[in-house]
Amino acid sequence: MKNLKKTILVNILVIFAFTTNAQENQKIAEIKIKTSAVCNMCKETLESNLAFEKGIKKTELEVKSSIITVTYNPQKITPEKIRKAISKLGYDADEVPADPKAYEKLSSCCKKENAAH
Ligand SMILES: [Cu+2]
């Protein structure tokens, strides 16, 4: 009798774990944000720094179009916060302008006014 109870309990836990996992998989969204990135260094800066942002799962910046594709968990981060994070790194993100202080710290080749390459 004791063993039966144990088996039932384990089964319930297993079912619970699977259900949680299924919900977890649905907590994924994707957004494309237009940035002011101009070169591969910008790509590096954005992708490596955004990786530390809570809720962001994957980032991929296309240098040619300056568009960054962000895969994120909408339960943990909002598109608004993602744009803020990009701005804090010194880059424009859609309608959110680059944070002036962060922008100043960028390498000269990464500044949008010098985008001659
Ligand atoms: Cu750059």
Image (cartoon, helix red, strand yellow):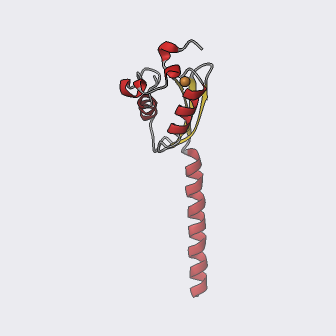
Q: Position of residue 18 (x, y in %)?
A: 60, 59
Q: Which quadrant of the figure shows ligand 1?
A: top right
Q: Position of residue 96 (x, y in %)?
A: 41, 23
Specify whether residue 30 is in view: no
Closest to the observer, 91 or 57: 91
**Is residue 18 positioned above or below 109 on the image?**
below
Residue appearing at x 60%, y 26% in the figure: 40
Q: Residue at x 53, y 20 (%)?
A: 109
Residue drawn where x is 47% and y is 21% of the image: 94
Q: Residue furthest bottom?
A: 1
Using the rendered view, name the quadrant where residue 44 is placed: top right
Mark yes or no: residue 112 visible. yes
Quarter occupied by the N terminus? bottom right
- Quadrant placement of the C terminus: top right
Residue closest to the eye, 28 or 60 = 60
In the orientation shown, which residue stands out farthest toward the left?
101
**Could you say which is closer to the camera, residue 96 or residue 6?**
96
Q: Nearer the viewer, residue 90 or 11?
A: 90
